Each structure stands twice: as structure tokens, then as C-alpha cells.
Image (cartoon, rainbow, N blue to C red):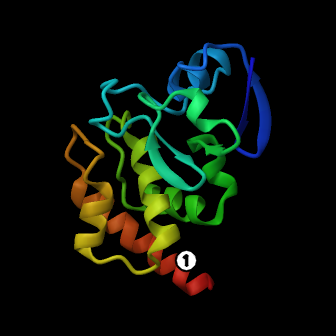
Amino acid sequence: MVTLNINGRDLQVDADPSTPILWALRDNLNMTGTKFGCGAALCGACTVHLDGAPIRSCITPISAAQGQKITTIEAMENDKVGKAVQDAWVKHDVPQCGYCQSGQVMSATALLRTNKRPSDADIDNAMSGNICRCGTYQRIRAAIKDAAQTLTSLA
């Protein structure tokens, strides 16, 4: 048994310590918001936060997360920054197929936590590891800028 802090709760996971976080979330804890895309940390669909930093959960073993905080897409609606990003996503009709969106939202949220007024280059850099096969990149950028404005006006 491994104890992981996920979305502010300590949860027991009955899995080998080398098990990727993605599979512990999906298979052991039935948290299916985090998606499997490539299994090689190339697409970003599996992005979660580990102590606030975006990571690829498909290659990060649960042993690397012990004693740290994992945050998943399931916690974003209760997070000021995550909620602003999700609201902007809806406003700008970002999702098409939607498969990559949890990873996109997690990366965008991490960006806006550290950069309140990101430039286009900042956004492109932060989101570069997230692939959207539907090609909604312009809407993603617009939504991130909108969320940044919303957060700035709330401050």
C-alpha cells in the first residue's frame, strides 16, 4: 500500500511503487478525468500537478509522488485559477473531441499560477507539450488570455 495525497486527501493505493500515477488514478482510484494518450510523455493528455508543477502522469511512478501533493482535473472546479480556466474554455468553445482537454486545462492552470499576464510566447511555451489533434490552439490561447484577465480583475 502506498499513501498518496490526491486533491487534498490522503488515499491508499494498493499498487507497486513503480506504477505510473496515471494508472493508480484511473485503475485503482477510479478517477478517470486524467487521460491516457501516448504513454511516453509526448502528448500531455495525462497532465496532473505534483506540488503545483505540471507533470506527465503516464511516466511518473507513484513512488515519486509520496509525500507530495497530486492535483487532478477533478479538483479544478474548486480552485480559483482552475475554475477561471474551465470557464474560459467553455466561453471560447475550446473542446471539440475533448480528449486532450483535461491535460490542456492542467497545463494552462499551472501557467496562470506562475504568470498572471502571459504573452503569446509564454502561452506557446507552457502549452507546447500538449497536443490537440483537433487543432484548437488559437481558442486555447484566447481562453488562457481570457482566464488571465478574469483572474486579474478578481485580484
Q: Point out residue 118 in the picture as x, y percentages from the top left corner.
A: 35, 76
Identify the residue at image location x=71%, y=13%.
14
Q: Residue at x 35, y 52 (%)?
A: 94
Circle 1 is placed at which residue position?
A: 151
- Looking at the image, residue 6 sits to the left or right of residue 99; the answer is right
Residue that appears at 77% across and 29% down = 11
**The N terminus: image quadrant:** top right
In which quarter of the view is residue 25 placed? Answer: top right
**In the rendered image of this protein, does residue 97 appear above or below residue 77?**
above
Residue type of the residue flagged with mark 1: Leu
Depth order, front residue of 137/42: 42
Q: Nearer the viewer, residue 66 or 36?
A: 66
Q: Residues within 10 Å of mark 1 (few under 14, many from 20)?
A: some
Residue 70, position as x, y percentages in the image: 63, 43
In which quadrant is the C terminus drawn? bottom right
Q: Nearer the viewer, residue 56 or 43?
A: 56
Image height of 9 relative to 35, above or below: below
Residue 140, picture quadrant? bottom left
Find numbered disc 1 in the image and state the secondary structure of the residue it sits on.
Answer: helix
Give the x, y percent position of residue 92.
37, 60
Front residue of this view, candidates 66 and 71:
66
* Image-based side of 57 in relation to 6, left or right: left
